[in-house]
C-alpha cells in the first residue's frame, strides 16, 4: 500500500462518516426537545390531558346554536381537563345576544371518564353519559342540546 492510497481511503471514509452523521441528524431532528423523534399519536395513548374545543358539527367557533327574531345563542369557547385519576372538568363559554345586547356565560360540567383504547366514556355528575372516540389527538363526542345532537371535537393541547 502506498501512502497516497491510505490517505485517499481515510478521506473517503471521513466523507462517508460525515454524510452518515448528517443523514442521522436529519432523520432524528424534529420539533421535540434534544432532537428526539416524536411518536405518532395513537388511540392507545392515554387520553388524560388538556383539550380545546375546535369544532361543533364540523364548523369552527363561534358556533350558533339558535338564531331567531332578536335572540342568538352561540358557543364561543370550551376547554376540557381530563385528569389522570379519571375525573374531567369541561368549561364552556356561550354568548346570548338579545335585541343586539350580548351577554357572556360560563358553565362547568364535572364528571368521570374511562378509557378502553379509542373508546372513552364520559359520565357527567348527575348521570348523563357520552361515548367518545379518541385517536390520540382528537376527542370527539355527541352532546344533546335542546333536542339536537351536537358533534363536539376537542383537540389535545
Image (cartoon, rainbow, N blue to C red):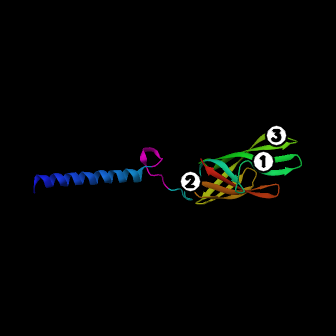
On whether residue 34 falls in the magenta region, the answer is: yes
Tell me what residue is drawn at x 77 percent, y 44 percent: 94
Asked which secondary structure carries label 1, the reply is strand
Q: Is residue 89 left or right of residue 11?
A: right
How far is the residue under mark 1 from the one under mark 3? 10 Å
Indicate left or right for 134 with 7 as reference.
Answer: right
Splitting the image into 4 quarters, where does residue 108 fall? top right
Please report whichever mark, 3 or 2, sits nearer to the chain's N-terminal start: 2
Q: Nearer the viewer, residue 142 or 64?
A: 64
Other residues around mark 3 within 10 Å, as few (<14) / some (14–19) / many (≥20): few
Q: Residue 110 versus residue 101: which sits nearer the camera?
A: 101
Which residue position holds label 1? 74
Q: Nearer the viewer, mark 3 or mark 2?
A: 3
Residue 156, how many percent across, how many down?
60, 50
- The residue that disc 3 covers is 102
Please indicate, yes or no, whether residue 30 appears anywhere in the rendered image.
Answer: yes
| Mark 1 or 3, nearer chain start | 1
Tag shown at residue 46: 2
Residues at discs 2 and 1 in contact (Cβ within 8 Å)? no
Q: Are marks 3 and 2 in contact (CB under 8 Å)?
A: no
Q: Secondary structure at mark 2?
A: loop
Kindly report the secondary structure that dominates the magenta region of the rendered protein. loop
Residue range in magenta is 30-39
Q: Which quarter of the picture shows residue 147? A: bottom right
Residue 61 included in the magenta stretch of the image: no
Q: Is residue 142 above or below residue 34?
A: below
Give how far apart the Cα atoms at labels 2 and 1 are: 31 Å
Image coords of residue 30 (percent x, y):
46, 49
**Residue 39 spot, x, y in % from top left:** 48, 54
Q: Whole-percent x and y of residue 128?
A: 75, 55
Amino acid at each position: 500500500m502506498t501512502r497516497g492510497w491510505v490517505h485517499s481511503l481515510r478521506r473517503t471514509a471521513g466523507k462517508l462518516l460525515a454524510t452518515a452523521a448528517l443523514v442521522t441528524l436529519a432523520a432524528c431532528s424534529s420539533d421535540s426537545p434534544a432532537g428526539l423523534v416524536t411518536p405518532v399519536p395513537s388511540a392507545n395513548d392515554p387520553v388524560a390531558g388538556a383539550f380545546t374545543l375546535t369544532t361543533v358539527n364540523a364548523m369552527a367557533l363561534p358556533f350558533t346554536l339558535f338564531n331567531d327574531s332578536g335572540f342568538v345563542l352561540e358557543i364561543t369557547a370550551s376547554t376540557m381537563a381530563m385528569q389522570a385519576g379519571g375525573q374531567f372538568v369541561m368549561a364552556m363559554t356561550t354568548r346570548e345576544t338579545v335585541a343586539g345586547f350580548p351577554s357572556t356565560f360560563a358553565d362547568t360540567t364535572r364528571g368521570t371518564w374511562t378509557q378502553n383504547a379509542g373508546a372513552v366514556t364520559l359520565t357527567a355528575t348527575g348521570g348523563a353519559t357520552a361515548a367518545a372516540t379518541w385517536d390520540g389527538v382528537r376527542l370527539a363526542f355527541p352532546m344533546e342540546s335542546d333536542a339536537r345532537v351536537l358533534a363536539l371535537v376537542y383537540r389535545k393541547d
